[in-house]
Image (tube, helix red, strand yellow):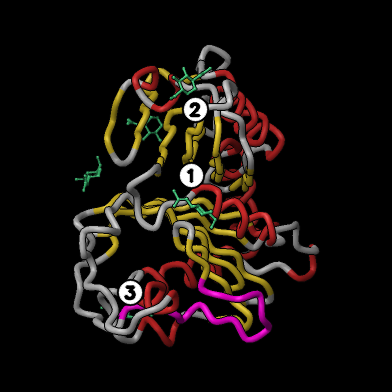
Amino acid sequence: MLSGFYSSLAVCAAAILPAVLADCDRAELLAFADSYVEAHETGSVSNLQNIADNFTYVENNKTREITGGIFFNAFVIDHRHTIADTVACATFTELIITHNISDEPTPHVIGTQIRHNPEDMSVYLIDLIVSGPGSWLFNASQTLYYASREDWGEIEEGARDSRELLKQAADAYLDMWNNASAIDAVPWGTPCDRLEGSVYTGQGLPTDSCKVGIPTNNNQAPNTYRRYVIDESYGAISVLCIFEHLAHAPDSHEFRLEGGKVRYIHTITLADSSNGLPPPARRGGPSARRRSLSA
Ligand SMILES: *[C@@H]1O[C@H](CO)[C@@H](O)[C@H](O)[C@H]1NC(C)=O
Ligand SMILES: *[C@@H]1O[C@H](CO)[C@@H](O)[C@H](O)[C@H]1NC(C)=O
Ligand SMILES: *[C@@H]1O[C@H](CO)[C@@H](O)[C@H](O)[C@H]1NC(C)=O
Ligand SMILES: *[C@@H]1O[C@H](CO)[C@@H](O)[C@H](O)[C@H]1NC(C)=O
Ligand SMILES: *[C@@H]1O[C@H](CO)[C@@H](O)[C@H](O)[C@H]1NC(C)=O
């Protein structure tokens, strides 16, 4: 009796909520991400289709007109990486740019989340973190060099980590600033490499660790206003947030997990790394510079 009741309830719910239950189409998500990248290549947003009535454009956590933002310039895209979240109906794209089409230096590293309305796929939010000269450890050529050496390829179906695990890993990492137990909740991989702005924590060795430069003071202001895009097929999760402990810097962290462990981390942070925040490391040399990154 009971099971009959529940199964007719399930049929009923499925009939009422088809749009909510269905995942968004990956190909459609990626097609819009392509047109977004094309807008950067042409320096014009006129190709962007199916924009929602309530569309919002956010650049470095500030709402503005899309035509007044970074799209005034026509870039050559040196590196592009996109993931798609069919549950949240969103994409994340990482772009590394050194020049524009006139071959003028226009160095930028950009992290972008795009959100669609699942009912009609219309785009209601384009949310960018745009770094440039003066941003945290910024050097686009060097970021390009390190990012190009990494393999963020698709993960075989049977070997994928769950959405929940990816989110738990990213949240634990971003909790380290204000939670002393969070460090042990991060599923650290070995090797693990973090590309923090343009600075690489590893040396391409099997022993590379992402624990280099992690916070030792866990009583700092938290990383808040987190927005997620999760793609299990690439073991990847993007989180845009605010680093409250770093002068409220707009920030992008993307994590790649393999076999349940963190393999790569990429960061884009809109903070000035030359202003003494956080305090410089005591020891000299390149590794000391790395150690001071996010502590
Ligand atoms: C390339 O960048 C330079 C410097 O920002 C700018 O003056 C020029 O208009 C740009 N060219 C294009 C085609 O966007
Ligand atoms: C715009 O519409 C989408 C889809 O209905 C909704 O999720 C989103 O919160 C809305 N955004 C704003 C700023 O109202
Ligand atoms: C960026 O890094 C490259 C490679 O490490 C270096 O040659 C270049 O001088 C750096 N550029 C700036 C502006 O620091
Ligand atoms: C601190 O992190 C641990 C491990 O992730 C978690 O279980 C705990 O709830 C967190 N504490 C607070 C106050 O957020
Ligand atoms: C970031 O944007 C959110 C949403 O508009 C706002 O509530 C928050 O105050 C902003 N934070 C900073 C540091 O600008």
Q: Counting residues from the N terminus, which is met first, the one under dot 2 or under dot 3?
A: 2
Mark 1: amino acid: Val
Task: Name above or below for residue 89 compared with residue 233.
Answer: above
Q: Which residue is drawn at 45% across and 57% down?
A: 197
Horizontal side, residue 222 vs residue 162: left or right: left
* Location of residue 267 with respect to 212 vertically, above or below: above
| Residue 115, horizontal then vertical, whole percent | 48, 36
What's the residue type where badge 2 is placed?
Val
- Numbered badge on residue 123: 2
In the displayed structure image, the side of residue 282 where residue 7 appears, left or right: right
The disc at residue 248 is none
Residues packed near mark 3 inside 10 Å, few (<14), some (14 to 19) or many (20 plus): many
Between 182 and 42, the residue placed more toward the observer is 42
Q: Residue at x 68, y 62 (%)?
A: 150
Which residue is painted at 57% across and 21% down in the image? 102
Neighbourhood count class around disc 2 (C-alpha, 10 Å): few under 14, some 14–19, many 20 upward: many
**Residue annotated with mark 1:** 109
The residues tagged by marks 3 and 1 sit, at their Cα atoms, a distance apart of 21 Å
Q: Residues within 10 Å of mark 1 (few under 14, many from 20)?
A: many
Whether residue 213 can be seen here = no
Residue 24 occupies quadrant: top right
